[in-house]
Image (cartoon, rainbow, N blue to C red):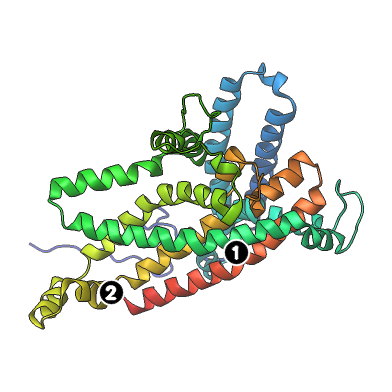
Amino acid sequence: MSTAVTERPAGHSASPHSAPKVDDGRLKPGRLVLGFLGMVVVVWLIANLFLAFAYYPQWFLSSKIIIGLLALVAGVGGAAILFYFLNMFVEALPRRLSEGLIPYAFLLPGFGLMSLMLLYPTVQTLVYSFANKDSTAWVGFDNYRNVIADQEFRTSIFNNFLWLLIVPATTVALGVIVAVLADKLSPQGEKIAKSAIFLPMAISFVGASAIWYLVYAWNAEGSSQTGLLNAVVTAFGGTPQTWLQISSGRLNSLLLMVILIWLQVGFAMVLLGSAIKGVPDDTLEAARIDGASEWQIFWKVIIPQIWGTILSVFITTVILVLKVFDIVYVLTNGRDKTNVIANLFFNEMFANSDSGKASAIVVILLALIIPVLIYQVKMFREQEANR
């Protein structure tokens, strides 16, 4: 039995359904224009909707629930539609250009939002630092001259220096000690100890300040003391003290630092404890076989191997200290020589309504933080390269 083979005549094209349509990779002007216009319209609609939430809440019955639901729907749905038109725009480009742009195109909205929320305010603050108190006229470097000549600013700089000198080093030291000691406990004991020490991390700075106010509180001599510290002092026959007003030796600032250390030790303990557990047992056993004591093992074996983590915790705490505000604002508001740069900015901006001077203070603070950030990035890259 023979099988007949039918040959397609020369010049006869295949059926349009016999093979999938292949993209020729050329520019598609129609889809390009549609994608671009779609993105513009979506951004315009979302921006105006959120402005309406702020300026015309009566349009939405002044209901926070309705505004919240609409914001959620518009935010999520708008982002999905925006990416749809963005994808259409990129795919309409020539193939080689499209394939190269796709990763950047989908990162663009995120970078755009970051620029809007971070870079634009930074540039605006820098510009306002050269303007007068209501940003209506240029004053050049007068704000910076006034800030540097201000005794309160010099006090704040000195206090920030003390915070930088004491808090990060103490936090890291206590974190290492607690991590090492907790590692010696039983598994259950280690969990309980670490949970108790980490617990303050769940408390806000304002909440922690309120808690520690009960430690430093003062009542007149002869009355019962609600403050724990004064209760202990009077129990031993001493005189109750207004602890947060004693600026001699910067005692009040040191007492404020205790609060931040209390909050951050748990953070340091968790990271450093993980690093310690990552130290290879082989190196520890080798050191013990060589006759090294536990103290020598700690300093010459463990510390060098967790040094990268120590630096990371230290730099993170340094950045936090440069921005410290809540504790000082709640407990003293900068009185009795306890002021810091962030609290000084807040008072200039909102209490004195001087946006020019406040902006100059922020720019100075930013200038102090940038070298620390650069060093942190450099150290992070070196750690990644050595892995």
Looking at the rendered structure, the kind of residue marked 1 is: Ile
Which residue is labeled 1 in the image?
Answer: 369
Label 1 SS = helix
In the rendered structure, which disc, 2 or 1, sits on the residue that comes first in sequence? 2
Query: At label 2, which amino acid type do we have?
Result: Gln
Q: Residue 366, position in %: x, y? A: 65, 61
Give the Cα distance between marks 2 and 1.
27 Å
Q: Quarter of the image for the C terminus: give it.
A: bottom left
Which residue: 48% across, 75% down? 378
In this rendered view, identify the residue nearer to me: 312 or 185.
185
Residue 326's tag is none
Please tell me whether residue 51 is drawn above or below residue 34 in the rendered image. Answer: above
Q: Which residue shows up at 51% across the image and 36% down it?
A: 240
Q: Residue at x 61, y 25 (%)?
A: 67
Residue at 54% in and 53% down = 87
Which residue, given by chain and number where applicable, does mark 2 sit on? Answer: 305
* Residue 81 can be seen, yes or no: no
Residue 92 position within the rendered picture, expressed as x and y whole percent measured from the top left: 58, 58
Q: Position of residue 71 (x, y in %)?
A: 58, 31
Q: Nearer the viewer, residue 162 or 183?
A: 162
